[in-house]
Image (spheres, rainbow, N blue to C red):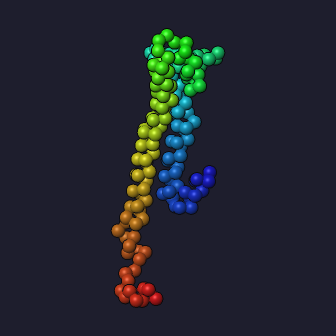
Amino acid sequence: CGYFGAAKDRGKLDFMEVATRLPVIALYTIFGSELLDGGLKRYLHNKGNCSEVLTKDKDGLLKAASLDEIPEIAKKLPGDYKANVNKLFKDKAVISMAPFLFSMLVIGSFITLMTRIWTKKRYESGIGNDNFQKDYTAPVKNLKEFAA
């Protein structure tokens, strides 16, 4: 609400920019990131990838192992312990970083594009308007008068 109030104080176009940007951010934060995370986990689980790191809890929801659990899981796996830990850390990184990178790259780029469009519109209706200089400034004929 405070963000809308500040935007309203800066003008109609600023308010409209916030009104278009905030719902995208809010909806993605509330619903989109969780859906993306859950979808990625289901996809990896169904493909059989990251099976040691992804497990179903008692409610049937997929849960990724914590960083603290990875060494314990690696001890139970056959083969080289160090190689198992490296593989499990990579799997954990994919599960954790893919939604984060999507947020940064896709959603961030979309918000940046929206902001650029609104900034251009504000510029064109203000300083970028040819009439802006004529309407709001008078040419200085004598620099000494201006300085006084």
Is residue 78 positioned above or below 121 on the image? above
Residue 62 seen anywhere in this rendered image of the structure: no
Residue for point 38% across, 75% down: 134
Q: Is residue 68 visible?
A: yes
Camera-nearest residue between 102 and 17: 102
Relative image position of residue 69 (x, y in whole percent) = 59, 22
**Residue 67 versus residue 56 in the image, above or below:** below
In this view of the protein, which residue sits in the foreground, 50 or 127?
50
Counting the numbered discs, the total is 0
Where residue 24 appears, as percent x and y from the top left, is: 51, 41
Residue at horizontal 41 percent and vertical 47 percent from the top: 113
Residue toward you, 137 or 112: 112
Which residue occupies the extreme top position in the image?
78
Q: In the image, is residue 148 above or below residue 10?
A: below
Identify the residue shown where x is 50% and y is 53%: 16
In percent of the image, x 58 and y 18: which residue is there?
Answer: 72
